[in-house]
């Protein structure tokens, strides 16, 4: 038994799942969304604490473009797991509309909804124009965040004669997805911090240290709360774990050389590809630095990451082609952490 297993079992560290609704070769976007809902049921049965979905616009390999809509479907298909967004990209939306959407979610699924918020704006000029946004909206993030939270607390300084229905008076826990400067925003606002990825360990630790140092207690959180996010893949062997990472690593390499983010390929198709030197370098880089391997290897690496960062929670994301292998990875990780799993038969229906 690895010495770091105790870091996952003897401490109150929570394990949660983020799913990006990645499309797979031979499967369309609607299938990817249904797969996300199915995975949420399975994550609940395995004992994970929360299940989050993401926001991407105009990306061929990602079906999740409307996270609050998808979160509603996930919440309706589950009974106890917390459900939220990782995250809603606030610069893409008016704060009032975001507040209303989460107010509706919280009203329908009380006590189970998380409001994960990000700072990214549409990643191409065309998408930003289609959204009616520009890079300035991202630069104004802190003010937009303050306005959004005010719709819940009743602080309507910018719009004194407008009420957010049914949001006002509700407490939907906000989380800030951040790297670098964003950790400072989370600290000043007194919000829980979600930070990744695990490959940039030194940068992550510096950001977490600054966040804890500068944190100001708020109505949303009395103390700092750190969620560390990253790719985790657990399998029966190192090679099997590596195969879990191959589809996403190739998809990222392809996107960085050709400008298009493709659906995930089966690992055997990736292995058979003839890559250019640049593609090969990007691909190998995409395979490195993640927490992947056998159960003992993952226990050691993840336990060390938790000890170093003092994380309160780990948000696991694994994009791969083989859904059965993905579920097996989540099952193995749940077992490592001693989560209170139950039979997956009903959850897979």
Image (spheres, rainbow, N blue to C red):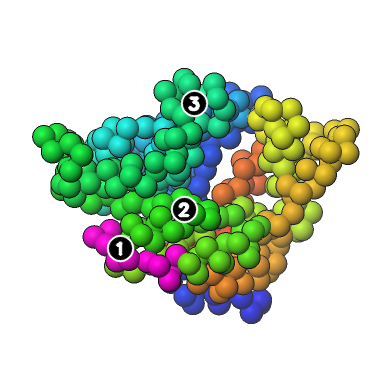
Q: Secondary structure at mark 3?
A: helix
Q: Residue furthest bottom?
A: 3
Q: Is residue 180 above or below residue 85?
A: below
Residue 219 visible in rendering: yes
Which is nearer the N-term, disc 1 or disc 2? Answer: 2
In this picture, is 118 found above or below 22? Answer: below
Q: Residues within 10 Å of mark 2 (few under 14, many from 20)?
A: many
Q: Which residues are magenta?
A: 211-220
* Quarter of the N terminus within the rendering: bottom right
Residue behind mark 1 = 221
**Dot 3, how many residues are within 10 Å of its Cα: few (below 14), some (14-19), or many (20+)?**
some
Q: Which residue is pictured at 52% across the width and 24% down the height?
A: 127
Quadrant position of residue 159: top left
| 303 or 184, nearer to the observer | 184
Residue 132 inside the magenta-drawn segment:
no
* Mark 2 element type: helix
Q: Residues within 10 Å of mark 1 (few under 14, many from 20)?
A: some
> Of residues 78 and 130, which is closer to you in this image?
130
Residue at x-position 48% and y-position 67%:
210
Please tell me whether residue 217 belongs to the stretch shown in magenta: yes
Please tell me whether mark 1 or mark 2 is closer to you in this view: 2
Q: In terms of depth relative to the viewer, which is nearer, 140 or 119?
A: 140
Q: Which mark is residue 128?
A: 3
Kindly identify the residue that appears in the image at 26 percent across and 35 percent down: 96
Callout 1 secondary element:
loop
The residue at the point 34 percent across, 51 percent down is 174
What label sits on residue 182 in the rendered view?
2
Residue 83 visible, this angle: no
Q: How many marks?
A: 3
């Amino acid at each position: 038994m690895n010495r770091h297993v105790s870091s996952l079992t003897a401490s109150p560290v929570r394990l949660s799942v983020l799913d990006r609704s990645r499309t797979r070769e031979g499967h369309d976007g609607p299938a990817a969304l249904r797969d996300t809902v199915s995975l949420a049921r399975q994550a609940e049965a395995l004992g994970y604490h929360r299940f989050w979905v993401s926001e991407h616009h105009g990306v061929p390999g990602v079906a999740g473009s409307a996270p609050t809509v998808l979160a509603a479907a996930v919440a309706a298909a589950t009974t106890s797991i917390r459900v939220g967004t990782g995250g809603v990209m606030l610069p893409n939306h008016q704060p009032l509309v975001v507040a209303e959407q989460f107010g509706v979610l919280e009203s329908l699924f009380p006590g189970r909804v998380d409001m994960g918020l990000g700072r990214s704006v549409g990643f191409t000029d065309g998408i930003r124009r289609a959204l009616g946004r520009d890079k300035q909206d991202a630069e104004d993030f802190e003010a937009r965040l303050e306005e959004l939270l005010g719709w819940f607390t009743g602080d309507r300084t910018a719009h004194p004669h407008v009420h957010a229905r049914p949001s006002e008076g509700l407490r939907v826990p906000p989380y800030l997805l951040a790297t670098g400067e964003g950790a400072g925003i989370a600290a000043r606002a007194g919000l829980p911090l979600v930070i990744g990825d695990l490959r940039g360990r030194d940068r992550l630790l510096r950001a977490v240290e600054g966040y804890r140092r500068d944190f100001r207690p708020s109505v949303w959180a009395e103390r700092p709360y750190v969620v560390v996010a990253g790719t985790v893949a657990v399998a029966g062997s190192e090679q099997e774990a590596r195969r879990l990472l191959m589809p996403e690593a190739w998809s990222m390499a392809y996107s960085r050389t050709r400008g298009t983010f493709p659906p995930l390929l089966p690992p055997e198709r990736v292995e058979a590809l003839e890559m250019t030197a640049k593609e090969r370098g990007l691909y190998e880089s995409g395979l490195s630095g993640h927490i992947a391997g056998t159960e003992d290897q993952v226990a050691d690496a993840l336990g060390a990451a938790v000890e170093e960062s003092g994380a309160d929670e780990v948000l696991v994301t694994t994009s791969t082609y083989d859904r059965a292998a993905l579920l097996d990875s989540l099952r193995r990780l749940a077992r490592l952490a001693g989560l209170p799993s139950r039979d997956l038969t009903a959850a897979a229906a």
